[in-house]
Image (cartoon, rainbow, N blue to C red):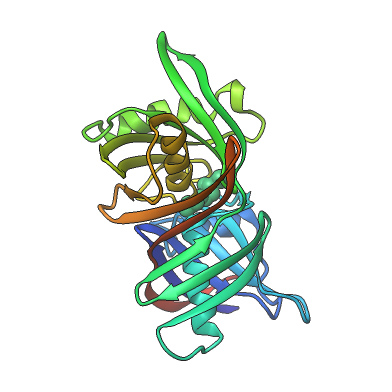
Amino acid sequence: MDVFFTKMHGAGNDFILLDNRQKLIQLDSSRISTLCDRHKGIGADGLLVVESDEGKEPRMVYFNADGSRASFCGNGARCFARFLFEMENKDGEEGEVCFMTEAGKITGWISGDAVKITLPTPKNLTLHIPLEIEGKSYELHKIDTGVPHVVLFEDCESLPRSMLEEIGSRIRWHKAFQPEGTNVNFAWRVGERKIKVRTYERGVEGETLACGSGVTASALISHLVLDMDCPIEVSVRSGETLKVYFVKSGPTFREAFLEGPAKKVFVGTIEIT
Ligand SMILES: N[C@@H](CCC[C@H](N)C(=O)O)C(=O)O
């Protein structure tokens, strides 16, 4: 069957979006990984599906490029908000949409090129986790911003991608973070309220040009460990900038918001057998 798709990206983190409200598209992990393959398919870091049940809010279902399902994706949710907004034929350049994810209800605000979203309430915070890898000591900070993340502070501006992926992969698969594994963020401060982040993503099993939940995790940890104030700007590998807002609640956070560009790249049809 020929399936209509939309290709989008959020600050360089790219996605295939499919409207499956009619429940006609059958997907399994091998089909998803082929669609996301940059040589044999459309190519993307992940695939987002719009589902909906009669009388209920639309639901965002997210799959990583390897076909694994994840409960949330920050940049994906920002693209999804724009996709939904355009699908619902709302007039004008500005507006609000709401949808469900496995990690909870999300609200998105569209304003020109930018999309700002609420994130799932951050949880599972643990600071200052010591980890030894191949004789080198690391200090990691863990937080779940919809999916599990660790953040480590290290200036990786000029670290070759292969080396970042080597360390990222060792941490992602480390026994301390099993069975679910973790995304790994390398963050460093570049201004009073500005950090840079590079992310090794679980399910892509490599560095992506941006990771929204990782950017949020890094900003929240920067507030706690480096005493940085809200909002925090985060520059990612694509060279684009995202902004993280948050509201504290005791030692952790009540709310977090992520803002940045989310753009449509192209549309097309692809045969799914
Ligand atoms: N790119 C994402 C995160 C997607 C999920 C992640 N790879 C996982 O499996 O945890 C984002 O923008 O948040």
Q: Residue furthest right?
A: 54
Depth order, front residue of 273/108: 108
Q: How many marks?
A: 0
Residue 252: image quadrant is top right
- Residue occupying the point 39% across, 67% down: 262
Q: Which residue lies furthest to the front in this view?
A: 250
Toward the left, the furthest residue is: 158
Q: In this view, does 33 lie to the left or right of 151?
A: right
Query: Would residue 52 appear left or right of 32 to someone viewing this image?
Result: right
Q: In this view, does 227 lie above or below 66?
A: above
Is residue 4 visible to the viewer in this orientation of the structure? no
Q: Would you place residue 15 above or below residue 4 in this image? A: above
| Residue located at (27% from left, 30% from top) | 155
Name the quadrant of the N terminus.
Answer: bottom right
Q: Image height check: is 191 above or below 73?
A: above
Q: In this view, does 270 lie to the left or right of 121?
A: left
Residue 13 position, x and y percent, is: 40, 56
What residue is shown at x 34% (from left), y 48% (from top)?
A: 234
Residue 125 x %, y %: 59, 33
| Residue 41 image offset from top left, x and y in percent | 45, 62
Quadrant position of the C terminus in the picture: bottom right
Give the camera-side residue of 166 and 261: 261
Q: Please tell me which residue lies in front, 71 or 91.
A: 91
- Report whether residue 77 is seen: yes
Q: Quadrant of residue 58?
A: bottom right
Kindly give the residue lying farthest to the top in the view shown: 135
